[in-house]
Every structure is written in C-alpha cells, then in structure tokens.
Image (cartoon, helix red, strand yellow):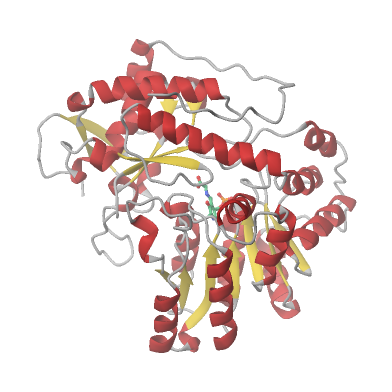
Amino acid sequence: MTKPRQPAEPFRIKSVEPIQLLDRATREKKIVEAHYNIFRIDAADIYIDLLTDSGTSAMSNRQWAALMMGDESYAGAKSFRNFEKVVRDIFRKEYVIPCHQGRSGENLIFSTILKPGQYVLNNTHFDTTRGNTQHKGGIAVDLPCAESDAPVPLPFKGDMDTEKLEHFIDEHGTDEIAMVIMTITNNSVGGQPVSMKNIKAVSSICKKHGLPFFFDCARFAENCYFIRRDEPGYENKSIRKIAAEMFDACDGVMMSAKKDGLANIGGFIALNDGELYQKLTDLMILIEGFPTYGGLAGRDLEVLAVGLQEVMDLEYLKNRVGQIKYFGEVLKQAGMPIVEPTGGHAVFVDAGQFLSHIPTKQFPGQSLAVAFYVEGGIRAVEIGSLMFGGTDPVTGEKLSAPRELVRLAVPRRVYTNSHLDYIGDVAKIITGRREALKGYKITYQSRFLRHFTCKLESISTRNVEVGS
Ligand code: F0G
C-alpha cells in the first residue's frame, strides 16, 4: 500500500513543550487508577492528547505579541474595541457580546429568548446547546439531512433536512419554535460541513416564517474551506468572502472561539437586533461580566482578534483539513473503519464495527479508547453508548446512541505528521489484537453527563446484559 502524503506545515516551530510517554506498566496502572475513564487521567500522564480540539490550539507569534497589548480596563477597553471591529468585519453583525466560552453564550441566548415548551431546531445540537436548551425548558430537535450517517463519502453531510424543517414548521406553527440554529461544522455528525446552498435554503425558510436563524459557528473557517473546495462556484472565492456570504444569511451567531478563534479560551454572540442585545447584556452583567469584557481578560480579546483573522488563511486551512484527511488514511491503513469523508477537526473510528464482538451495552467505544491509552499513551474519547446512553435524568426515558464511535480530535497547529504516524503504528497493534479487547460495565455514574466522571470495570464474559 502506498503511504498517503500529507502537506508540509505552513509554519515553523518557535517554542516547544516536552511530552513524555510513560512505560506500559505505568500506563496500565494509571488506567486502573482512573477506573478506565480517560477523563480521570492527568494530562501529564498522556503522550498525545486528542480528547478535544477545543482550547488546545498553539498560538502564533502574532497572538503572543498581541497578548502583551491587552488593555485590562473594566469598561470600554481598547482590546474590546479591537475585538469588536474584527468580529463585525467577519461576522457582519452590529452588536458584539464577548463571553468566556461557547456555552455561556448559549446560556444567555436561551435564558433570554426561549419560552418553556418551545422547540429549538438544529441540524444537530452539540451537547451543550442541547443541554442549555433543555435547562431552560426548551425541546431540542435535530434535523440532520438523510445522508448524515450514510456510509458514503458525500461532501456536505452536515446539512439540515429542509423538507423536514418545513414540515416541522407547518405542523407546529411558528409560536412553538424559538429559533433555528445551524451548527457549522456539524460536530456531532463527525465535523461534517454544511453547504452554502443549504444555508441559504434554511435562511429563506426562516425568513418566510419570521423565525430567528442563528449559527453555532465554532468551526466556521473550516466550513468555509470545505465550501471553497467542494461547492461549485466557490473555488476562486476568498475564505473571507465566503464567510461574509454565509453570515449575511443569518440573524446572529454564537461562537465558541476555543476552536476557530485559535485561542485557549473565549466566545461571543454577535447579532443585529438591538432590543435583543439589550436584554442579553442586561442578564450578562449578572452572570458573566460587563458587556465589554464578558468574562474574558483584555489580553484574551486581543488574542482572539488576531486568531479569528489568522484562521481564515488559505494555506493554514489547506494544511488543517489535509492533516485530518491524512490522519484518516493512516488509521484506515492500520485497519480501523472510520467515518468518511473525514471532517474538519477530528477522525471518528467506528468502534461498533471494529469491535463487533463487544455488545453495545458493554461499550465497544470505551474499550477502544482504553486500548489507545494502554497501547500508546493516546487519549481519545468515546462518543457512543457511554456518552449518550443510560437514562434521561429529567424524563426517566431510556436513551440510546446512534453509533459507537471514538473521536480523535486534532488540536490546531500542535502535533506533527510524525505524531500521527505514531498513532497509526499503535492502531496497527490494536487491530492485531482486537479479538482480545474486552467490554466494560459501569460501577458508578452521575445523573447528568455521566461519561465525564463515571467509573468502569473490565468484563470478560461476552453478551452479558450490563451497562445501559
Ligand atoms: N458548539 C459546538 C459546535 C461545540 O463543538 C462546542 C464545544 C460548543 C458549542 C461549546 O463551546 O466548550 O466553548 O463552551 N465543543 C468541544 C468539543 C467541547 O470537544 O467538541 P465551549
């Protein structure tokens, strides 16, 4: 098999952070001490950490320089004005509200506009948008396109199903719907992009019915890159122009800037509705901070103002998306089935298929995540029955996960091709002994979001009815 080729990084390394691979016996001890839950392992005991691409980016020399320019004034800081200008330019909205991260923006929005019992429609809610909707008494409805989980490599599997959207609106009426959200890229279906065509179609449906249309745009630049690469008519447009066209189609945005802000913390809301802005900032002063800093330091705002622009650099994006594609090839060549095409920020391994001898109730994804740590000191995260199964803490309903996946999210500008090749070697070893991998059962779990803190135990008997 020929080795896939990965484009060389469009940067060189100026500052390094040592990482160490513990010996196997120590890794085995650590995973037992962590009760087989990788969230319970200290970062210092991980060699390559692919838990998330959120807040884990490496900053550029320009961002480090900008950090020194932070104006830490409580009100009306210069750093806020810089940040505000950049956000207005890219996202094309008048009012800019900084927040300390994505979910605090979600909390503000849903606390303000959602009436209990109303629906929030989304191509697919990310966990925190779903959680914040439910926390304010709303009902989160996902309307992913039919192709979103098809085992075929289509270009825009993140799209929303517009027929279902129209049907839902006709059935329930606009009073029952608080807002429509488009998550770009669509994290929960594998970081898959949304096409401009779909964005515009959803936008015109919302306009027709007078429904607010917002973006959850944590990975907006990656989405723009996919549009440029794969959607006819955009091949010669700049990322900035594509972003402008995209954002002109919506009423407002919420962004976790810990992803495509190339920063370690931060987020914001931007919108054109002055009345809503007033309501949001009134609440914000109570829970997040004065409207010109929003839970962030002036230096964080400076870092974001640079990061939001750097992330639109075409060479950067080519490398970023190319690196994820390369990583997918490496894992495939190591014998692991992956979700295709690879999206913008992570590779998702189909653990249900890879470890078909482990029943869903014994968490095949967790078994693979544990194997990545024990075999190679790599941290990945289960996105399957452990994360989404169990019992709904509010309704008592039995929950189920659509698929048993393991996500290997790649931090931006942090790991090199050699790290990815190393993971490929570890994956080959795991493939070689996959029949020996065992399932797990839960020995402790919390009521909400159990995967973060649960404790597990290895089980060796096949087809035992445990877990749930
Ligand atoms: N929206 C999307 C699409 C996200 O992926 C995330 C976070 C958030 C909102 C919440 O933002 O973490 O800044 O509060 N995703 C991270 C992940 C945690 O690992 O995918 P936050």
The answer to whether residue 428 is above or below residue 442 is: above
Q: Nearer the viewer, residue 211 or 25?
A: 211
| Quarter of the figure with residue 398 | bottom left
Q: Position of residue 194 (x, y in %)?
A: 53, 60
Residue 279 visible in rendering: yes
Q: Position of residue 22 (x, y in %)?
A: 44, 13
Q: Position of residue 243 (x, y in %)?
A: 69, 59
Q: Position of residue 289 (x, y in %)?
A: 73, 58
Q: Quadrant of the N terminus?
A: top left
Q: Tell me if 242 is positioned left or right of 76 in this view.
A: left
Residue at 43 percent across and 25 percent down: it is: 378
Q: Nearer the viewer, residue 148 or 80?
A: 148
Q: Nearer the viewer, residue 329 or 289?
A: 329
The answer to whether residue 283 is above or below residue 335 is: below
Q: How many labels, in total?
A: 0
The answer to whether residue 218 is above or below residue 56 is: below
Residue at 46 percent across and 65 percent down: it is: 123
Residue 33 visible in rendering: no
Q: Tell me if 348 is positioned left or right of 114 in this view.
A: left
| Quarter of the figure with residue 355 | top left
Residue at 73 percent across and 80 percent down: it is: 275
Residue at 43 percent across and 79 percent down: it is: 117
